Amino acid sequence: MSDLVVTHAAKSYPTPSGPLEVLKDADFSMRRGESLAIVGPSGSGKSTLLALLGGLEPPTSGTITIAGQDPYSLPEQVLPKFRGEQFGFVFQEHYLLPQCTVLENVLTPHLAIGSAGKPEQDAARELLSRVGLAERLTHLPRELSGGERQRVAIARALVRRPTLVLADEPTGNLDQTTAGQVTELLLELQRETDSVLVVVTHSAELAAAMQHSKRLDDGRLVDQ
Ligand SMILES: Nc1ncnc2c1ncn2[C@@H]1O[C@H](COP(=O)(O)OP(=O)(O)OP(=O)(O)O)[C@@H](O)[C@H]1O
C-alpha cells in the first residue's frame, strides 16, 4: 500500500465573485523513499496543495491519507500528535527558535508530543553530525550561516523519521552552491529515513533533483 494517497482531491476558496478553484482533481500516490517536485507559476496553488497534504487545510472534496490515515477524519485532539509523528516541514525561512541552541531546536519535535530522553538526544546528535554540525550543538541560530541554519531545519524535520516530509522552497534563500549542498543533504537524509518527500519550488535545479515532477497547470497536476 502507498504511504501517501491523494484521491480526487480538490480545493476551492470562497470569493465575492464565486468559488476560486485552486486545485482540481489531484490524484496520485507515493511510497516511502520516493521524492516529488511540484512546480508551477506564482499563485498556481502549490502552497495550497502542500497545506492539504500536511493536514493543515482540508480539501473541499476528495481524500488524502498518510500511512493509511485520513488526518481530516481524526478527532481534533489527536491531530497534533498525528502531525508530529507523520510530518516533517521545511520552509524557505528556517523558523528555528532564536533563544534555543541547535540541539534544542532539533529536539523540539520530540518535546512537542512527548519527551526527549537520552536515546532521542543521542539520535539528534547523530543527525546533526550527519549534517556537518557536530561542533555547533550549543550554538544559537544567529551564530550560524543561512545554509547551516537550513541544515538544522532539515535535521529537525527528519528527527522523528516522519512518513512525509513537506518542503516549501527549502533553498529559496540560499546562493546556488549552498542550495545545491542543501538539496543533496535533504535527499540523502530522506533516503536514509525512508520518508516520502514533496517539495514545492520555482527552482529548476531543485525540481530536477527529485525522482518525479508535476506541474500545476490551471489547477490540474500534470506529470512533467
Ligand atoms: N485562504 C485563502 N482564501 C482565499 N484565497 C486563497 C487562500 N489561500 C490561497 N488563496 C488563493 O489561491 C491561489 C493559490 O495560492 P497559493 O499560495 O497556493 O499559490 P502558490 O502557487 O503557492 O504561489 P507562490 O508561488 O506565489 O507561493 C491564489 O490565487 C491565492 O490568492
Image: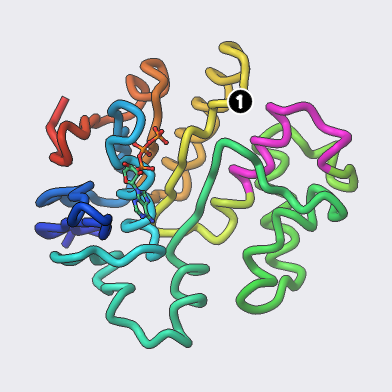
- Say which residue label 1 marks: 173
Q: Report the predominant secondary structure element of the magenta stretch.
A: helix
Residue 40 position by quadrant: top left
Left or right: 179 in relation to 203? right
Above or below 84: residue 213: above
Is the shortest distance between ligand 1 and the CB of mark 1 under 8 Å? no
> Is 153 part of what is drawn in magenta?
yes
Q: In terms of depth relative to the viewer, which is nearer, 215 or 208?
A: 215
Which residues are drawn in magenta? 141-155
Q: In terms of depth relative to the viewer, which is nearer, 101 or 42?
A: 42
- Residue at x 12%, y 59% (from the top left corner): 7
The image position of residue 97, as x and y in percent, is 77, 53
Tally of numbered tags: 1
The image position of residue 23, as x and y in percent, is 19, 48
Left or right: 26 in relation to 115? left
Residue 185 position by quadrant: top right
The image position of residue 25, as x and y in percent, is 10, 51
Above or below 105: residue 145: above
